[in-house]
Each structure stands twice: as C-alpha cells, then as structure tokens.
Amino acid sequence: MNIIVCMRQVPDLVEELELNDDGTGLNREYLKLGVNEFDDWALEQALLLKEEHGGSVTCLALDTPEVDNTLFTCYAKGADKAIKIEGDFANGMTSHSAAKLFADAIKAMPHDLILTGVQSVEDLDGQVGVLLATNLGIPHVSVVTGVQVNGKVAVVRKEYAGGMLGEFEVDLPAVLGIQAAKQAPRYAPISKVRAMMKEKKIETSASADGATEAGITIRRMFKPESGKRAEMLEGDAEAVASRVAEILKERGLVK
C-alpha cells in the first residue's frame, strides 16, 4: 500500500506575529515556521497503517523555509520517502493553490491512500483535503479519527459536532483529512534527525502552475485591541452579590 502524507509549514504561534505593511497578511521576513500540527497526526496515522499492513509512506511538502528539517524529521519517524515541490512559496499559499500543487505532483506518483491534516492552523478552513480530492477525482472524508484498511476499502470514523461519530466505507484510492490518530504523534530525537540528514535524500518535484483565482481575498487584518482590565470583586458573598447587581444595572442588562 502506497500512502502519501501532505505536509504544510505554518507560522509558529508561540512567536510574536506581525502584520505586513499593507495589513493584508503576516510579515514573513522573520517569521518562524513549523509543521502543521494536524499534518503530524496524519503522518502518525500513515505510519500506524504501514506497521499494520506494510507498504510505504511518502511525505510531500511545498518548498517553504526550513521544510528540509520537517522532511528529515519525517524520515526519523519512519517515512520511506520525502519529496518537496520546488517553487517560491515563502509568502504563503492559499488552500486552493496548495491543493492544486499537491494534486499535480501526486498524479505522477503511485498512491492508494492520501492523508492530510484536517485543517491548517494558518487558515482553519479545512479545504486542502477536499480540494485535493476534487483535483484528483477520488473520494474524500474529513475530520477522521480512525482508519482501518481492508484490501481496496478503508473503513473510517468521522467525528461530528457534539461528539457524534459516523462510520464510512471508502473505496481506495481516497483522500482523508485526519483530525487524530489512535496514538499521539511519535517523538523523533534530534540525534536521529541529524542521522537522517546524512543517510537520506530529499527528492524534488517540479511545480506546475498552482495559481488560482478561487478562494478568499483578504482585504485587511487587524491585531486584537486591548480591552479594559477586569474588575476583581472582593468582600463577602453579600458585598460581591451587591456589586454584581450594580454592574448589571450599569450595563442595562437588568432594571
């Protein structure tokens, strides 16, 4: 079984994020990137399926800053092949364009199952997997929390709002948007990642034209404004209750 995992680099949310000059996006000059959390779950699911059924796992990523570290980490975790799609993607990529670039690369690769993270922490629209499947003309299921493969059919568990679960049978090849695997993503020691840098090679794939006019156009972004500080209520229960009543009246919530 040939499993492909699409990996994306996203801004590190621990870092201080700054807007660009025209306010339409992030200032990426000094932006630190890391692997998308949900893509890491997708990789773990792929490795679990490989351990159970055999086959190979290929990690596919766009050529963004520091992506080599991500792909060598994939090797350290157990991936068999790592490929980066060449191009200038340092300024970010819409879901539509990313899906088209991934699809064009995957069409030339053997694939039985394609896994993506359910969404990216950068856009939170959950569309890459859907659009990827559309471009490839194959089935798709998203918000997946469990996968079992039986021959040419995958039985997948999909989560709905309110904790409801649904189970689907999907003919392979298919695209699955992974929200969680059976276990947390495995850890790759730095020493093993460095060893992979010496032993393994990252292959490259020429990118086709991924430009697309579809998607959301951002006109302006704003940083959150600081509000008034919270008022801490002190005193006994009667004093606190009295002050709460005053606040509700001041704000017109009660008469």
Image: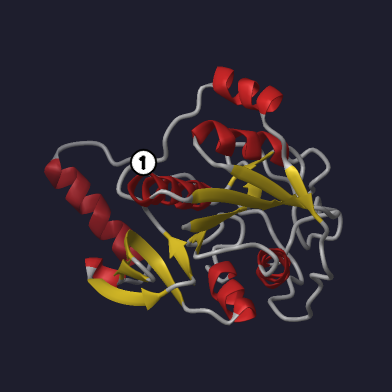
**Residue 211, position in %: x, y?**
81, 72
Q: Nearer the viewer, residue 83 or 151?
A: 151
Colouring: secondary structure
Judge by depth and name the residue closer to the eye, 112 or 255.
112
Where residue 111 sits in the image (x, y, percent)? 56, 64
Left or right: where 110 falls relative to 183: right
| Residue kind at label 1, given as amino acid type | Ala
Name the residue at 46% across, 51% down: 55
Q: Position of residue 115 (x, y in %)?
A: 50, 60
What percent of the width, then of the height, locates residue 117? 50, 57
Can residue 172 be seen here? The reply is yes
Along the line of sight, the residue nearer the viewer: 17 or 237: 17
Quarter assignment of residue 142: bottom left
Find disc 1 in the rendering and name its residue: 184
Find numbered disc 1 in the image and state the secondary structure of the residue it sits on: loop
Q: Would you identify the image quadrant in which residue 82 lies?
A: top right
Is 24 above or below relative to 55? below
**Residue at position x 50%, y 46% in the image:** 40
* Nearer-the-camera pick, 95 or 151: 151
